[in-house]
Structures are given as C-alpha cells and as structure tokens.
Amino acid sequence: MEKINVGLIGFGTVGVGVAKALLQKSAQIERQVGARVVLKVICDNDLRRKRNIKVNRKLMTSDVNKVLGNPNIDIVVELVGGIHPAKEFVLKAIKSGQHVVTANKALITEHGEELFDAAKKAGVDIFYEASVGGGIPIIKSLREGLVANEIDTILGIVNGTSNYILSAMAEEELSFSDALEQAKKKGYAERNPALDIGGYDSAHKLAILTLLGFGKAVKLKDIYVEGILDISQNDIRYADEFGYAIKLLAIAKRCDNEIEVRVHPTLLSKEHLLANVNGVYNAIYVHGDMVGGTLFYGRGAGQNPAASSVVGDIIDLARNLRFNSVGRVPIYMKNESIKKIRKIDDIEASYYIRISCIDKPGVLAKVAGILGRHKISIASVGQKERRAARIVPVVMMTHEAKEKNMRQALEEIDRMAAIRRKTVAIRVER
C-alpha cells in the first residue's frame, strides 16, 4: 500500500491542528509509516468560517457522505464532539470497513463498548488517544506499555480548567470566583464551565482510564462526582499549613474483586508526585504490581497537544494498514474478575474537616463526641483566627474512617446550634 487516505470530519480547533500536521509534516509522516498519508477530504458544516490555515478548496465539503462509506477513504477522523451525530458517523464508518480515529471522550464513555464491538465485528480499528490527557500518551501506555502489570491504582489530574483555578487560588491567594474569572479571561475556561468545575469532564475521562487500566466498563452514573465549587481560599491555606495541596482528582482503585471510581477534591501530601502539577497541565499516576508508580505529565488541552495525539493515532493505523496488522493490539480487554463497583458509602479515607462555629466553650468537645460515636478518630485539630460575629473556623484531620460514618457524623454536627455554615469535608489521598 503506497498511499493511505484520510477523511476528516470536524474542522474546528483540533481539526485545524490535525490538518496542519498532515499537510506540513507529510514527509516526516511518510518516513514513519513507509507510505504516503494523504488528507483527502475535510468535512464541516461551516465552510465560510475563517481559519488560520490555507487548504485547497477542493478538499472541503459539507457533505459527510463524501467521507463516510467512500471507498477511497481508509481512515475517518471524527472531531465533531458530543454524542449525536458523532455516534452515527463512527458507526457508519465502521460498517463501511473504514478505520476510525476520534477524540470524543463523551462518545467513548457512553457508547464505547458498542463501538468497540462493532469495530471488532467489522475487522477495523478505532483509536482514541486524544480523548484523555490531550497530548499525553496515556491510552497507548495502558493498552501496550503497561500490559505486563496488574494495575491497582489510577489517579488523574485530567481537567486543566479546575487545576488552573486551584493553582491560582494557592499561588496567587485568589478567591474561587476570582480564579475562575481569570481562567475565563485567559481562555482556560469556557463561558459555561459547569462540566469542568463540576467534575463531569474528569468523570468521562476516568471511565476511559478505568476501562483500559482495569478492563471494567463503567458509565457516568457509576462514578461518584463532586466538583470544586465549595473549595475556599481558607481551605487552600489550611491544607497548606498541614502539608497538603488540594487537587481535583479522578480516582480508580481496585480492591480485590471490587473497584472504586470517584472524582472529587482531594488533599495530597506535598511529597506526592501529583501535588506539584499546576496550571493547565494534566498528569496521570498509574501504579502497577511490576513497574510500581509511574507518572504521565503534559498539556491536557489545546490545538497542538490534542492534534499530536490524533495524528499519532493516524500514524499507528496507517502502519497497521501497510503491514496488514489490523487488530494487532486489542481495543481493550474485559476483566471478568472485577464483580462490582464499590459504593461511595463503603470507601475508607482520612478526612480534612472545616467547621464554622460560634466561639464558645464546649463546642469542640461536642464535635469530638459526635465523631467518636461514629467511629471517627481525630489525628489533629486547630482553631484558627477569630472572625467577625464570633464565628471561627475549626480545622481537623482525621484518621481513616468509613465514608458512610463520616456523612452521618457531618449531618449531626451541622444540626448543632453552634454551627453557622455547612461543614466542609475533603478526602485525603496518600
């Protein structure tokens, strides 16, 4: 095979980056593959929009059927985003015998198994490196580089917007709202950043990492999700005094025949590899039984990092086509030994607790009594500076406790007359 043709659907930010790479790096890509990789068709529903790239107008079309099912297109690149019509595009490509590259995390999370089964049946490959971590090659590493390992833990900072906000709060002592506004001005946050700061973008990516690392398919509804909206400048400062940084973590852990999958703000020791990942950078920590702890770090978003992963997938697929080795690496391997997803109530963790209470004798003793009745022991405690209206923050670190017990204890604490604001509790990751 001397020439491999690519059809691109979606000519937005990442699509432009992919087109630039295919057109400007054609000689380098040919050396890598041993055959020419040609951008044959670019499809988008808005052909008039100005883009910072010059392409031959003959390549452009608004008719998706000039890509899908076209016998002259070997690889279809889906960069439309969302579920529909992206799902229909990918399925049609697969059924037409075309190989697929996508960056669509929502599509892979919600319909990955269906798409993967269809690809296997049709004898084609579907690659999706850019769906997690932008330019970080985490999916290839889990599918190939780490397959000799039994993975027991995956921890990920996989949302640049949230990480930027928490970093700005820590480094510049900004409030949450000021840090969010700064992120918007710099283009790091969408006008409506709800999916990012609410944790759901991270949850989509965690589902993909869990599928590859543990062989267990999980849906968004299976993942406990908690965003960073309730994190205050006080929490950042108090955590720092205890020797911790606060990060929004995507967490997957295997515990015998169960798996934990959760996204929430987390206290990390400053000595942890992830604690010093700041700004818009992403990082994924993977622990395997043979390799131990590994860290994958880099830019998690943006035109060039995402395009790097998409073009890397195109090159991999082109090599497979040239050497007739389609399906050489399984899309994922099911692990039947994992029987269930552990409920959030059943996990165990240490906790940081911040209580806002009236400054009067006996309050701390009552709080300690409630925690004790719920089998929660205190590791350290500090009453911070006095505040207006005699309301003071009391900050505690607990030993490991069951989530269900902690929730019940907090509900009881918040019913106390001396408590003036909802108590904040943040889990600690060692």
Image (cartoon, rainbow, N blue to C red):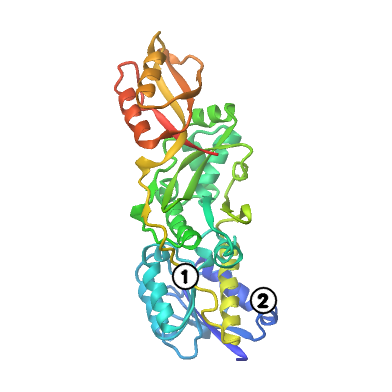
Q: Where 405 sits versus 49, above or below?
A: above
**Residue 235 at x, y = what percent?**
50, 30
Q: Nearer the viewer, residue 141 or 215?
A: 215
Q: What residue do we see at 55% from left, 85% from top?
A: 5
**Considering depth in this image, is 184 or 73 the residue closer to the camera?**
73
Name the quadrant of the N terminus: bottom right
Of the two numbered discs 2 and 1 on the same chain, state the one appearing first in sequence.
2
Q: Where residue 231 sits in the image (x, y, percent)?
A: 46, 35
Labels 2 and 1 touching (C-beta < 8 A): no
What secondary structure is found at the residue carrying circle 1? loop
Q: Amino acid at mark 2?
A: Lys
The type of residue carrying mark 1 is Leu
Q: Which residue is mark 1?
A: 79
Image coordinates of residue 154 in percent, x first then y, are 52, 52
Numbered label attached to residue 71: none
Quarter of the C terminus within the rendering: top right
Depicted 359 relative to depicted 427: above or below: above
Q: Depth check: give the residue in front, 189 or 202.
A: 202
Please tell me how crowded label 2 is: few (under 14), some (14-19), or many (20+) other residues with Cα within 10 Å. Answer: few
The residue labelled by disc 2 is 25
Q: Is residue 203 left or right of residue 35?
A: left
The answer to which of 228 and 331 lies nearer the viewer is 331
**Total numbered labels:** 2
Q: Indicate left or right for 33 with 346 as reference.
A: right
